[in-house]
Amino acid sequence: MRGLKCSAASFALKLKIILVIVSIAIGLFACTSGKTGRSGIVIADSSSYEASIYRQNCAICHGAEANGKMVDGTMVPSLRFGDAAKKSKEEIFQQIAHGKLPMPSFENQLSEKEMQQMVRFIIEDLQGRKYSKNSK
Ligand code: HEC
């Protein structure tokens, strides 16, 4: 009788230990499975129109994931962090439309609407900042 009680108690204890281990494992998985650990999207995984414009026109200099890159001895800045993340909608639009050497102007390659879409893409999807059509 005593032995039976004891093994029931140790079974319950084992069950508790297993539950704790499983919940730690789930917690760890949830924390590490976020691909970038940042607020921005993974461009390579995105099928949005803006992501495809980015891959065709911008990735060559700003890097596949917009984290910046060395091109011909010049450091092309990240579009996720740093100065880019402090710029207003208007400043980003001007940068894309008119460029700033060595970045070319895109006003002959992209439509006005596409350039606006890229501004939203950079602010909202890459930087995780709030974007609203009507704000500055
Ligand atoms: C030929 C290379 C090149 C290409 C292509 C290019 N850029 Fe740039 N871009 C640069 C460089 C270099 C700078 C930094 C210019 C400077 O000194 O201010 C820059 C700066 C920027 C900035 C301002 C970043 C900051 O830190 O303030 C934005 C926004 C930007 N680019 C967006 C884009 C977008 C969107 C595209 C695609 C439509 C694109 N760029 C394509 C080279 C490029």
Image (cartoon, rainbow, N blue to C red):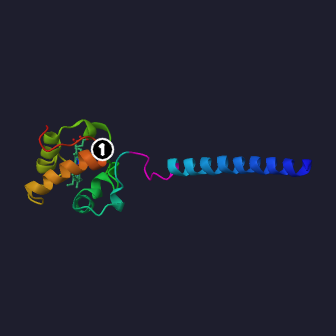
Q: How many marks?
A: 1
Callout 1 environment at 10 Å: few (<14), some (14 to 19), or many (20+)?
Answer: many
Q: Is residue 125 magenta?
A: no
Residue at 19% x, 52% y: name it. Answer: 118
- Left or right: residue 44 versus residue 18 is left
Asked if the stretch drawn in magenta spans residue 36, the answer is yes
Q: Quadrant of the C terminus?
A: top left
The answer to whether mark 1 is within 8 Å of ligand 1 is no
Residue 49 in the image, given as x and y percentages of width and height: 22, 62
Rendered image quadrant of residue 85: top left
Q: Is residue 116 left or right of residue 15?
A: left
Front residue of 1/24: it is 1
Which of the two residues, 14 or 9, is positioned nearer the viewer here?
9
Is residue 108 or residue 7 the one in the foreground?
Answer: 7
Q: Is residue 67 left or right of residue 121?
A: right
Q: Quadrant of residue 94?
A: top left
Q: What is the three-letter code of the residue carrying label 1? A: Gln
Q: Label 1 belongs to which residue?
A: 127
Which stretch is magenta? 32-38
| Residue 91 in view of the camera | yes
Front in this rendered view, residue 103 or 26: 26
* Residue 104 horizontal/vertical position (percent): 16, 52
Q: Position of residue 98 (x, y in %)?
A: 11, 48
Examine the residues drawn in magenta and state their main secondary structure: loop
Q: From the top left corner, tell me how far across and down residue 133 is, in percent.
A: 14, 45
Q: Secondary structure at mark 1?
A: loop
Q: Residue at x 14, y 53 (%)?
A: 115
Q: Residue at x 25, y 35 (%)?
A: 86
Res 103 seen here: no
